Structure formats: C-alpha cells, structure tokens
Image: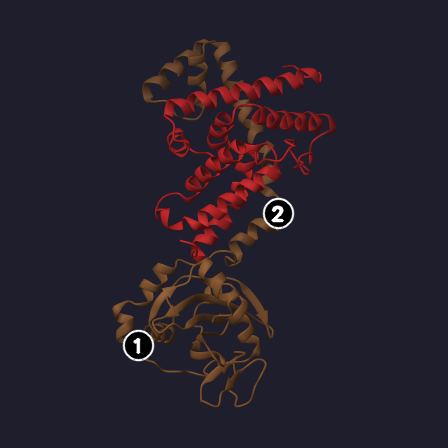
Amino acid sequence: MVGSTQSFRIQLTTLLPRLRRFGHALTGNTDDADDVVQAALEKALKRERQFQPGTRLDSWMFRIMQTTWIDMTRSQRVRSSRAGTMEEASFAVGEDGRSSFIARIQLSETRRAMQAMPDEYSAALALVAIEGFTYKEAAEMLDVPIGTIMSRVSRGRQAIIAAVNGKATHSGEPS
Amino acid sequence: MTKDMLDKLSAYLDGELDDMARTEIELALEKDTDLQAMLETISSADNSLRPAYAATLNAPIPDRLSKILTEPEKTSLPDWAGMIRSLLRPDILAGATAALVIGLVAGSSFTTTNTPSAEGFIMAETGEIIAGQSLATILTTARSGEIVQADGHDFMIRLSFKTDDGKYCREFRNQASVGIACSNTQGWKIETIGPNLSPPSDRFAMVGEAPSEISAAITRLGVAEVLDIDGETTAIHDIWK
C-alpha cells in the first residue's frame, strides 16, 4: 500500500522523538539516526497494511529501524563521523561546575560505550534500559531468544560501567 | 563474580526474574555486601543511559522527517488495483449515474464559461466542456501523486487510466473539487466534476473512497488499463495520444 491513513501518520508523528532517540543509541550520532528514522518511516508508510491494529506501533517501528540499520551498515551507507552531535545544553542547570563537568563526561562516555559495543548489544540495551521494553518484547523485536536479550543487556551494562568508571577515575573521581 | 550472577543481577534490576530466582538473589543480597555494591553499580549504568539521549528526545524534529508524515507521497503511484476494485464495488455501480456536474463547488477555481479561460473551462463548438489552459497543462504534464500549484490552488492527479475505447483519462482534484478529464483532439474533455467532500487532511489522499461522481464516470468510461509509472511516463512523453 502506498497511501497511508491520516491516523497512522499521526501515530508515527507522536513516535518521532522516541524513534530519534533509539536511532541515536543505535547509530552513535544524530545524523545517522535521522537517516535511519527517515528510511524506516518510508518503509512503514509503504507497509501500513502489514501493521496489525491492536499491536504496538512503537515495537513495530523499532524493529523496522533495527533491520534498516543493519541494512545500512552492511551496505556502508552510513556517515563517516560517528561522533555524537547533540549537546546536553540544559543539563548543568542547578548543579555546580565540577559535578556538571563530571556528569557531561559520564554522558559522553556512556554514548561512546554504546557506540563501541556490537550493534546487537546496544540495540538490546537501548530497548530495555532506555525505551522500557520487557525482555520478551525486545526478544520479539530483535528476533532472538529471551536469554540472549538477558545476556546482551547485562554485557552492555558492564561496558557502560567500565567506560564511565574509567573516565571518572581519569578525571580524579573515585571509581 | 560470575557472568551468570551478573546477568541475574541485571535481570533482577529489570524485574525479569521468576519468583524463585528473585528470592534467591534477594537472600544473597542480604548477606553479601559485594553483591549489593555490584547491584548499585549496575543500577548506576542506567542512571546515565537515559540522560545520555535526553537531548535527542527533546530536540526539535528535523523538517525532513516531519514532512514525510505531513505531505502526500509525491514520488509513488497509488495502489491502482485496490483503488479500481473499490471503485467498481456493486453498491457504487448501482448508484452510478453519468451526470456531468459543473460549477457545483463554491470556492473552487473551476468556473463554467463559454469563452476560453486560463483558470476555468472552455465550451467547445461541439458542446463539450474542456479544460482551460492551467488545468490542461497539469493534466498533460503532471505525474500522479504530484502536487502542482496553479491559479493559487494545489492540484493533484490521482489516477491515470486508458478506457475501453482507447482514450486516456485522468482523475484530478484540488482542495474543493474532484473530476475526471479524458484526452481528445481538442484537449482534455471534462467528463465529470464534483465537490471534494473529504476532510481537509485527506483531500489529497491517494487512496480511499472516491466520490460517487468519480465512480460513476469511471464505470461509464470503462477502464481497460490503469497506467503504472512506466505507462504514465510514456503517455506524458507522447502527449496522451
């Protein structure tokens, strides 16, 4: 189906902020994230008939994004820079300079660690720890057993801990 | 600490353990301060994850994304087969008439006229109503799904087809009107026109129920072939001859 209903488009519009966040966690930068979101939206509009009313549209879209990202990385249609491009402009409000600085480093290292880990780990961790899906839901989206999700989420968290603690120690903070 | 224990602590944090495993972890946590410290450390990873992407969540949506969802598709053709099937439904056929309706629509750019007009229609010597210059240009050159501006209005071609007797016809619409025009030796003959009664958000939808005037005209004309992208490209190139 090429055309799509207005209500379907409205639902997709309300999902856009979360799709971009998931894309950022998946790809490591906002430019690639928006490329993935754009490609996923175009696919979704063409496949609206495949979406089953009564099921979760966000799950359906995240799955499309995940496969789209795999396709893009396989064909190397990703941008060269993998640096994050979004700043936490308002994060320092109410905090002193030092803690704000440390917090910024931690966030930066968190993103760097997400970017450095294998895509299947970052996808599982993003779906569970950021988007709030259950292991079962994430397993269905990524088409893997629940035990695999459990392991990937745990490994992903360990990678984040190692990255953040390493940088905090380097910055004079206790690990 | 074993990988298995780390996985269980992580799953415990996510509320994903069954009752037995959860009880086992909670008993262990009561006795083991290292385990407590590890649980806190694992929890701290999540404390930085959501804030790490909060800026992206709260950032303005780029135009290139929002436009995909707010603008009609411009590069693809509609589900031709499905559209024709819906147009040829028996209940629509039963109520179909071959009426030619002109000038029904208040606010439309289409006007009935006996003289050539850039924005209205032309009454030919044969008594036929043919498209004025602006509409004729759109009918001749625009691709289906493309929004074209003329005379201060957006126009879209929704469907191109060939009739049983070999004529090329196109369904067109603007915010206020819908119609069908077929190519002949004098230009584009208006076969029917009626009000676009769709809600404003759907007035340029590529699929959906067609007004009864359109359904009736399509039935009357007889659809031998609905043009796909290639067929439409060829017809535009050959000026619909």
Relative to residue B6, is residue B197 depicted above or below? below
Q: Secondary structure at mark 1?
A: loop
In the image, are marks 2 and 1 on the same chain? yes
Residue at image point 39% right, 68% down: B162
Q: Amino acid at mark 1?
A: Ala
> Chain coloured red: which letter?
A
Residue at image point 42% right, 62% down: B227
Q: Along the line of sight, which residue is nearer the eye, A82 or B192? A: B192
Within 10 angstroms of label 1, few (less than 14), some, or many (20 or more) residues? some
Q: Along the line of sight, which residue is nearer the eye, B48 or A157? A: A157
> Chain coloured brown: which letter?
B
Residue at image point 45% right, 58% down: A6
Q: Earlier in the sequence, mark 2 or mark 1?
A: 2
Q: Secondary structure at mark 2?
A: loop
Q: Quadrant of residue B210?
A: bottom left
Q: Along the line of sight, which residue is nearer the eye, A145 or B25? A: A145
Give the x, y percent position of residue B104: 45, 82
Give the x, y percent position of residue A47: 41, 48
User: Which residue matches tag 2?
Assistant: B60
Q: Badge 2 sits on which subunit? A: B
Give the x, y percent position of residue B147: 54, 64
Q: Badge 1 sits on which subunit? A: B
Q: Tell me how far mark 2 sits from mark 1, CA to CA.
A: 49 Å
Relative to residue B231, is residue A122 depicted above or below? above
User: Which residue matches tag 1?
Assistant: B96
